[in-house]
Amino acid sequence: YPLRRQRQMCIRDRVMIKGVKAETIQEVDIVVKEVKNCPLKYDNTERVLIIDADSIMYFASHFPEDSLMEFPTEEERIEEAKYRTRTKLEEIHNNIEEFYNIQETFIFVRGRGNFRYKLYPDYKSNRKQKNDLIPIISLYMLEELNAIPSIGAEADDYVYDAYLLSEGNCVVAAIDKDVLYNCPDVPFYNYRSHGDTLGEFKQISKEESRLAIASQVVIGDSGDGIPGAYRVGKAWCRDNMHLGMTDYQFTKAIFRGYLKASGGNGKIAKEQARLNYSILKLYTQDELETINKR
């Protein structure tokens, strides 16, 4: 991948002032994006690459108003979105292959019939913007790029199941923190590109995973429209949860958070905690089959 640091380039701009040729020098910042937190050496362990590609689909399909002059027709926007999708997947694969011995790649995208909408009708209701290109790019990924649809669930669930099936011999690529929290002890590549960051390698332990998941049940997930325990946030979780707690201790802490939010009503606290946990939890294929048979 390219050299990864910020550089400055001087551009000579020749202008005419009252018939006299003059030179001005402008400094322009050139930001070279880099992959952060790269492994120190190549890992020869045979692994599979598991990609949650839902976010790629959304990024590739987004055309702000100031870009419509460049891509004025729907056909041009579709072709550009396809190009962005291919390019991003290639970028992810290349950056990971530089450090890991990837034998096979599995790409997961959204499917239909996500059971979470039945449990909680307001699920993701805060995502109001409609993008007509997303179904087109989803179909393109399924038909042309061999992506796998997440039937009855989310791509997150399918990624989680694939992670378990790999028995740790995998690299997971996603931007969703839910995926990171549920896939401990394996290399995780966050492919979100921003500022001077092209992507970032991460990894969390099982203990960190358990703490993060328990905290999220209390805090909720604003991106998915899950409120969590009302007015019980990160500061409360920091004070009441910590690494090394048992499952029972985490369960008690979660209940106390919801009890605080409900004004001491134990019945409401249990109902809300169980509902939000069932929405936030990631499921295996066996669990999904049981759920979707109900």
Image (cartoon, rainbow, N blue to C red):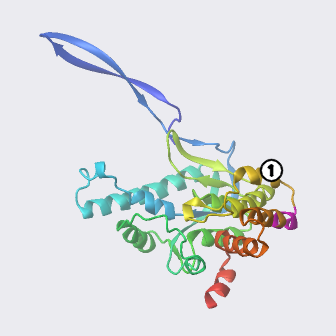
The quadrant holding residue 139 is bottom left
Decide: is 269 above or below 68: below
Q: Is residue 282 visible?
A: no
Decide: is 55 above or below 239: below
Q: Which residue is mark 1?
A: 239
Where is residue 254 shown, x and y percent of the image?
A: 78, 64
Decide: is 237 above or below 291: above
Residue kind at label 1, given as amino acid type: Asp
Where is residue 221 shown, x and y percent of the image?
A: 61, 61
* 10 Å crowding of disc 1: few (<14), some (14-19), many (20+): few
Quadrant containing the C terminus in the rendered view: bottom right
Q: Give the residues in magenta.
A: 246-251
Name the residue located 57 percent from the left edge and 81 percent from the top edge. 118
- In this rendering, position of residue 119 left or right of residue 131: right
For the stretch drawn in magenta, the main secondary structure is helix
Decide: is 124 above or below 12: below
Callout 1 secondary element: helix
Identity of the residue furthest to the bottom in this view: 293
Where is residue 268 shown, x and y percent of the image?
A: 72, 74
